[in-house]
Image (cartoon, helix red, strand yellow):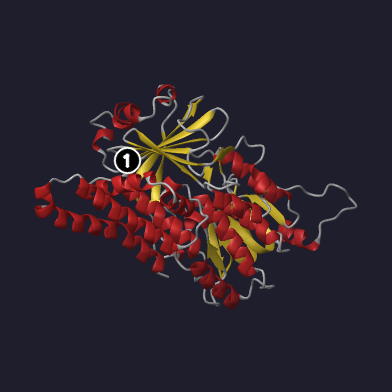
Amino acid sequence: MPLILDTPPDEPGNPLNPAEQRRRLHHDGDVVIVGAGILGCALAVALADQGRSVILLEKSLKEPDRIVGELLQPGGVHALKELGLRNCLEEIDAIKVKGYNVIYYGNPVEIPYSFENPRPEGRSFHHGRFVAQLRKAAMRHHNITVFETTVTSVVTSPDNNHQVLGVESLTHNTQRDYFFASLTVISDGYSSKFRKSYIPHTPTSRSKFWGLELIDTHLPLPEHGTVVLSSGAPILLYQIGTHETRILIDVPENTPTASVQAGGIKSHLRNHVYPILPPSVQPAFLRALDSGSPLRSMPNSFLPPSTNKTPGLILLGDALNMRHPLTGGGMTVAFNDAVLLRDLLAPIPDLSDTKSILSVMRTWHWRRKSLTAVINILAQALYSLFAANDPNLRVLQRGCFRYFQRGGVCISGPVGLLAGLIRQPLVLFFHFFSVALLGIWVMFEDMRLWEWVLVAPWRGVAVFWKACVVIFPYIFAELRS
């Protein structure tokens, strides 16, 4: 038997109810969810609250240890509250996040989530502690049974349009087992083993985040994420505990200063990252770099969303859709996806109604875009500007910083989009091209008179064209079904 990780009734007079017997003894439920991570746990609780019988499978229930998935935007906190899981942010030493501090070549600008009270807040924390809390919430639910087992394949019906009936798994590397349900949900993360079989897109990555944990350091602006911009790729810092601060350094592929010939990634961090960090952070950064702990990295992947079209199966989370983690939008997308899917499935009493489920997934795919298209496009476009590697992108980068410096709606609009509070793609479109036009104007201001005549027209067109090249591919990716 796979290891069952919930609390069984221990009194002889309190026998298992029929649904729990089916889950425990026959491995049969209304829903099988593969992956007890951020989205898997949230959706399990959401569907269990509807009275569904849920089986939740996870290959390892040890507390995960990751360097991303540590910042939850205000829109994600709100969705977590809607799911009844807001208490999972308690007792994990989570830190309030009230906005961002962007430092552009040493010049800072504060970007609060809001100028009005009550101000929305995000939270930052150790990823593993938060996931552990979500798993505890799932294990406590009487409609959920959690099994520690490794899913190896999907079970399909050969005579019914390849409808998915459940999954096959392996426990302790030897014991084979099967779990069946009317609906199978796969949320097995960024390295999903099932993605390529069911969606047409594959993840692409242009860079990695290299992460360190800084102890007892002081950010320039407490309770704010810090973004450091210079001639290289962006650097992100945020506090994840009373004594711990995460630093994530973006290193694009084929960065010459991070090559083996140049001394490797450690040399790059010491010689090219350390000098541009805020002075208050530098001592802790050197201590972490010299501690002897192995450096850790995660690929920064992009995967456009696809419509789920397989009968009996739903792919969710990073298995379906990813964006650059620079903006910290991944968990906000996940929790809002769970809320939306819960609400759309609520009127369907029988999840074996394949026609209705496929119709729901088409609706879900398009309705989620009011939020996810904003976060996906913003993450990719902002990374292109913040990691500016050609003259036209640097014009846009400078325009972005000057835009923030103007304050007012030039801050509240972009940060509202980033926080998951403004769910209007046209607002993103407006602010992006406002940044582009301001960047072009700032470039013109620096030109001499003869350059206005000979250089300004074609440089202006080139910068505007670059802005279009940055954003439109991601818009088109969202419009594909």
Horizontal relation, residue 155 to residue 369: left or right: right
Q: Amino acid at mark 1?
A: Ala
In terms of image quadrants, where is residue 434? bottom left
| Residue holding disc 1 | 233
Query: Residue 77: percent from the left, percent from the top?
Result: 59, 49
Residue 372 image position (x, y, % from top left)? 48, 59
> Vertical placement of 128 versus 282: above or below?
below
Q: Can you give x and y, in whole percent of width and height, for residue 405 in the image?
A: 37, 44
Residue ID at (16%, 46%): 447
For mark 1, does the 10 Å Cα neighbourhood hold few (<14), some (14 to 19), or many (20 or more) residues? Answer: many
Q: Nearer the viewer, residue 431 or 247?
A: 431
Q: Name the secondary structure under disc 1.
A: loop
Residue occupying image coordinates x 57% and y 45%: 121
Q: Is residue 383 above or below residue 423?
A: above
The total number of labels drawn is: 1
The residue positioned 37% from the left and 63% from the top of the image is 475
Residue 134 visible to an observer of this rendering: yes
**Residue 244, above or below 455:** above
Residue found 49% across the figure and 64% down from its top: 370
- Left or right: 72 as drawn, with respect to 351: left
Q: Residue furthest front?
A: 449
* Residue sitting nearer the eye, 428 or 196: 428
Q: Quadrant of residue 44?
A: bottom right
- Residue 184 image position (x, y, % from top left): 59, 64
Which quarter of the rendering shows the C terminus? bottom left
Place residue 467 in its image quadrant.
Answer: bottom left
Compare residues 78 and 426 and report the one nearer the observer: 426
Depicted 425 relative to depicted 266: above or below: below
Residue 288 vs residue 351: left or right? left
Q: Looking at the image, can residue 302 be seen?
A: no
